[in-house]
Image (tube, grey):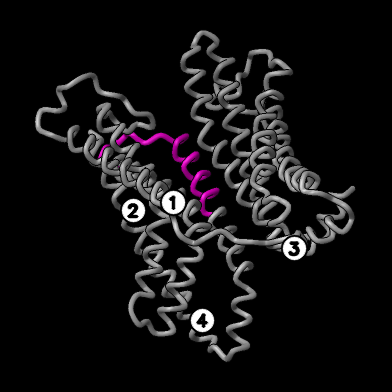
Amino acid sequence: MFYLRLARGYRVPDLGRWLLTVLAAAVVSAFLLRSLGRAMSDPLGGEDALVRLLWCLPPLAAVAWFAAVAARAVPAQRPERITGLRAAGAGSGRIRTLIAGEVVLACTLGSVLTLLVFLVLRNDIAGPALAPDLGMGVPLPAVAPVALLALVPLTAGIAAACAVPPTEYLPGGRTRTRGGTGFGALRVALPVGLAVIGLALELIALRPGAAADGRPIHLPAGLGSTSTAALGGWAASAVGLALLTGPLLSWTGRLLALGRPTPLRLLAGRGLTAQARSLGPPLAVLTLALALVLTTIRYWIGTPDSADALPAVEACLVLGCAAAAVVTRLAEVRTDRRDVTDVLLRLGTSPRLLFGAVALRTLAVGTTLLVTGGATAALAAAGLR
């Protein structure tokens, strides 16, 4: 009954977030049921069945991460809801449970819809092309699809519950202190070390005659093969560049406000420095996913008949979840800075100046992501052969 009353107060962003969660959960459930159908059609292919299940992990992780980002943004976007719950006596654990329960309900609905479509298609409706994916002609164990589909709401619900801020950071709490905007030495040294080590491994793998060393690793999704050093070097560099996204955004903001800045540069630089810690992770994930997709498309174009439909669909889902997480985090940042914006307007700041600061921040962020994403894509393309 609580969630029915909650849905009556949904705004367009709330409804869009809920529908996106349902859609993403439905797509991941389709991947899981397809792996089950393939396993039933080929019961002796145990290793292939494990590989197909492993292919479901990236979209499952993407949905769980989007659920975590969306759950974290609920207290900031709907403070009146959290304040009302606290006034009614709900503590931190109760609020976490309620927000996670909303995510679980959305994922459960998406999984149930996919299961219904799966069962309808198995009723001699699907054609011969879909028969292996549905496991037609083989009895369907009742526990198997339920156990697989339970992974989606369970994973998303746990991620959402863990992402909700503690009590003192919720609206109506005792305090609402904010952490510093800087990054410690260890926070910067680790990604720099990973990037340097990864680049060194990549150069070792690309030296003349390195192709004859060891056995090549055959990559999935029709991406050819690569060496162990090249794959390990790219993975270390990609993780390092992703972890460096937050510090780079902070340094870019400080660079904008360096010296004797104009009001435009000062607002843009200070705002970017303050937002770097919260915007860094979702932008890093989106940049990494986009770099992988562009590298894959480039390889498929250069190598005809190597494209695979399943990785393309999974890539679209991961990109969609990453983009939705970025939009959700941007809305959260905008809500957090609403008080600052109101103060600036009351002091006589021109709206045109605020719009220019936002445009300058966007340009600075785009330039930073172009550097990190371009380096990630270039290292990935160099390691493929």
Which residue was labeled with disc 4? 354
Percent coordinates x, y for residue 281 in the rendering = 49, 51
Q: Give the mark toward the camera: 2 or 3.
A: 3
Question: Callout 2: few (<14), some (14-19), or many (20+) C-alpha neighbours within 10 Å?
Answer: many
- Earlier in the chain: of badge 3 and badge 4, it is 3
What is the CA distance from the residue labelled 4 to the residue labelled 2? 27 Å
Q: Amino acid at mark 1?
A: Ala
Which is more foreground, mark 3 or mark 1?
3
Mark-to-mark CA distance, 2 and 3 = 35 Å
Q: Which mark is residue 328?
A: none
Residue 332 is inside the magenta segment: no
Disc 4: CA contacts within 10 A as few (<14), some (14-19) or many (>=20)? some
Helix, strand or loop status at disc 1 = helix
Look at label 4 and name its amino acid. Leu
Q: Are marks 1 and 4 in contact (CB under 8 Å)?
A: no
Labels 1 and 2 touching (C-beta < 8 A): yes
Front position in the image: 84 or 150: 84
Kindly identify which residue carries mark 3. 79
